Amino acid sequence: MYDTILLPTDGSEAAVDAARHAFGLAEQYDATVHVLSVVELSGSLDIGDRDTERIERRKTERAAAAEAVVDAVAHEGVTVETAVEAGSPARVITEYAARVQADLTVMSTHARSGAGRVLFGSITEEVIQDGDVPVLAVQR
């Protein structure tokens, strides 16, 4: 059923919860888990901060966070590929899912509602709406 599972992560505890689901499914279906971390360029970095050195430093930090999630929950025998990309998180996630032909994306969500949802938005919701890959949203 699942050959390729995408796990976008920011290294948070909520992402670790989602990773547990992703790796459990990967073990059950003998799937590869692609762990993706995104350096957000829109909004998190000012125009002046978009220099290559700062972006590379953020990529290194994100790679370490992704590795920490893998180390925390990876199952023996599950194939893992990690990647760090820069851009708008929802766009990067949906494009990466298409590129690796993911069968499922597993993401955490904080299940905000009302004003919190309006103010902070939801990357998970954007991926669900804009992507073509089914999404398992793990509520924190």
Image (tube, grey):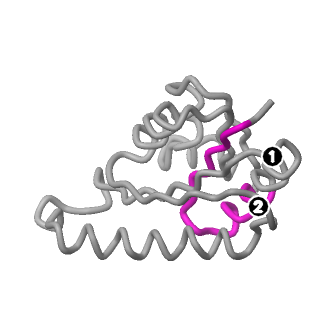
Q: Which mark is residue 11?
A: none
Residue 25: percent from the left, percent from the top?
82, 47
39 inside magenta stretch: no
Q: Which residues are magenta?
A: 3-20
Residue 16: percent from the left, percent from the top?
71, 65
For this orientation, the residue located farthest to the left is 48
Which quadrant of the view contains residue 23? bottom right
Q: Quadrant of the C terminus?
A: bottom right
Query: Is label 1 in a helix, a strand or a loop?
Result: loop
Q: Exactly how many numbered labels are in the figure?
A: 2
Q: Residue at x 66, y 61 (%)?
A: 15
Q: Residue at x 38, y 74 (%)?
A: 60
Q: In front: 39, or 32? A: 32
Q: Amino acid at mark 1?
A: Asp
Side (left or right) of 26 relative to 90: right
Query: Is label 2 in a helix, a strand or a loop?
Result: helix
13 inside magenta stretch: yes
Within 10 Å of disc 1 (Cα), the crowding (few <14, some 14-19, many 20+) is some
Q: Which residue is mark 1?
A: 30
Residue 98, compared with residue 13, is above or below; it is above
Q: Which residue is mark 2?
A: 17
Residue 119: percent from the left, percent from the top?
47, 47
Q: Residue at x 54, y 73 (%)?
A: 65
Q: Which of label 2 and label 1 is nearer to you?
A: 1
Q: In front: 33, or 108? A: 33
